[in-house]
Amino acid sequence: MKENLFVRAEDDMDFMPIIPLNESDNETLNDIQIPKELPVLPLRNTVLFPGVVLPITVGRDKSIKAVNDAYKADKLIGVLAQKDSSIEDPGVGDLEDVGTVARIIKLIKMPDGGTTVILQGKRRFKVGAVTAEDPYFKAQVVLLQEEEAPKEQDFEAYVSNIKDLAAQIIQLSPNIPSEASIILKNIENPSFLIHFISSNLNTELHEKQQLLEIHHIKSRADLLMQLLQRELQFAELKNKLTNRTKTELDKQQREYFLHQQLKSIKDELGGDTNEREAREMMKKAENKKWPDAAKDLFRKGIERIERMHPSTPDYSVVYNHLDLMLELPWEEYTQDSYDLKKAKKVLDQDHYGMDKVKERILEYLAVLKLKGDMKSPILCFVGPPGIGKTSLGRSIANAIGRKYVRISLGALHDESEIRGHRKTYIGAMPGRILQSLRKVKSSNPVIILDEIDKVGSDFRGDPSSALLEVLDPEQNHTFYDNYLEMEYDLSKVLFVATANDINTIQPALRDRLEIIDLSGYAVEEKVEIAGRHLVPKQKEAHGVNKLNFSISNKMLQRIIQEYTRESGVRELDRQLASIMRYQAKEYAMKGKIKPQLLGVDIEKVLGKSRYSNDLYKVANMPGVAVGLAWTYVGGDILFVETSLSEGKGDLKLTGNLGNVMKESATTALTYLQSNARKYDIDPDVFSKKTIHVHVPEGAVPKDGPSAGITMMSSLASAITGKRVKPYLAMTGEITLRGQVLPVGGIKEKILAAKRAGLREVILCWQNEKDVQEIDSTFIKGLTFSFVKTMQQVLELALVQ
């Protein structure tokens, strides 16, 4: 146990004199017979000075035995301070060399087994040699002579100054009784005065020990005066801080009293008080990192809510607004992962192909890594359904380590869905953008704006116009939400929009988007996607992932070619799901399944093949040509049929054609009329025959200029009686001068031709660059002819 010093009852006590039993004892100190060997009592945390009375509690067994034996003998004991007070069981080297011979005045046995002993210091001594360590320390002591106090005038000034400093410290220390200054004034012996003040000085242990060891009384007084000066400065500073704190406490007490009165008044008016809710909100607000404008708006809201009664209608309005402010992630960002290799690996794992998109994301990350800060781009993925535009957004979020949010804009027709409602309306809410940020607790997520081309518009406003501010990097750092009623920074958000048809997006909105075209998949790509992603996904979804069976690439290719006709892989996913359900049923009923699926098994599950390429292998009659078309679901094959009948030179167009397509047919006919002799056509045909052009699948609307050369080839074939070459498809716009112009959607159209089993494609020479962008392995087996004029088209297309 520790030997606790009774000098200070409290930790912050600065100075507490211990009243000496008899100051005159100092005069007879030299007359005491002190033996050459004394038991030694180690003291912790304090130093005993001659003449000073000190009560201590002794707890260590060695110390208790030493005190008891000394008390039974001559009541004299040597007291030495420990060098390090933290040592529980000190050795000889842990004790100071100079200490004080003390007389045990009183020995008190405590109920807890400890012993309290009251000591009075008698004379200083130096340890000559330690004679015993067990059962307690014994040492030979060399008594040190006390120097007589000099009669000089300057020494009297020292003593007077020490008394004044001690009196000032007592006055500034509220824990020291005022009677202590009276005791000090009545001490006449300078040596005892110095010992008494040194004993009670609130200073370091080694400084007290230094005071004890100094032999010259004048030097001791000089050091004591320096320590008192330091103590006085500390007491003055402490007193100043205490007074300042007291003033603040007085102010707080006054405010508390007024608040209590206000609370009583509210209680008299009836109803619950709202202080608790306001207090909770203010506590939450302490840790928010928000701009000054938001902080000021929140403070005003709190002041309003404190003045309101909870039963008033406006209370919930203000409360919900403040709640939104607290839950929004002001300046809270997730840390981006700048590991480009890891990001590329994540993107490649989640999606096969799509190199252009992946490169764009990696470029964005590279700039962020080098610059540290950058306005996020506004990307827009345009492509047919089912190719993974939306899932690519989630993959991007995973790759760069950001939160992910998806906002569906399909059929959105209210501007308030984006900007929020005025908070005064009943049922008002913030816009979807802020709701999403509130949900993910981050100000820099990846937000997918799905189906941005299908945003509606009516009398309630135009959401696409509201999106102009959201998707403009120069404006979205000050996005204004009507409900929040202040600006919010969206510049760190990575917006990714998806669309099927870019033409339906408002032009001003389209101008703000960085368009990235995503074309459909080739058969080879679909096989890879099915093997890597779709088959494992469907196996797990149907509980057959642990069964030992597989679908070969050849079977996957057959499913793709004979049971699907799409740019994406959604229909393929559904066909694979049918196969997995069949396998689950087989295993449940028979307990086993085939390890490899064969063609007969595919037919048994999916039925006869739905699509066949035989249609294009049959030699067509004159007047039938195959064109390539682009639809929002991908590329497609288009038949154009022309027949002649007796009439007056009329042109009939059927098949639900749009204006542009009708004009293409008229242009083709006019070109053939004006160049009839060049192609050995009888001019009378155009005045005596009715020409009928039909495009099958009449229920499907068709439009666009890309069927121009197909219509011209069909017309020329019907009029000349020459058949169009089999396995041939074509696409291109025509002019009256006989020129062939380029068209769009080339990759989609070529993949459609490949899916249909065609072998040759005629294109405008300016579309050659589009063909070069397609992976050569995906178009293996296709021959391309690039033309500039209509004459070249007819030379390639028509056979005898």
Image (tube, grey):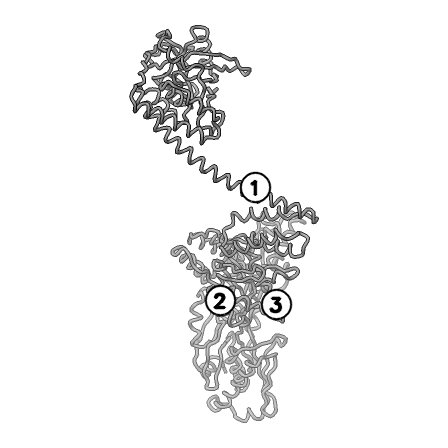
Q: Residue at left 66%, top 51%?
A: 310
Tell me where residue 489 appears, x and y as whole percent: 49, 59
Which residue occupies the foreground of this view, 146 or 725?
Answer: 146
Q: Say which mark, if any, is on residue 253.
A: 1
Q: Which residue is mark 3?
A: 413
Q: Amino acid at mark 2?
A: Leu
Q: CA distance from mark 3 to mark 1?
A: 56 Å
Tell me where residue 781 appears, x and y as whole percent: 47, 68
Q: Which residue is mark 2?
A: 513
The reply to whether residue 790 is visible in this rendering is yes
Which residue occupies the foreground of this view, 481 or 616?
Answer: 481
Dividing the picture into quadrants, the one containing residue 452 is: bottom right
Q: Earlier in the sequence, mark 3 or mark 1?
A: 1
The outermost residue toward the front is: 153
Q: Amino acid at mark 1?
A: Gln
Tell me where residue 298 appears, x and y as whole percent: 55, 54
In front of the other: label 2 or label 1?
1
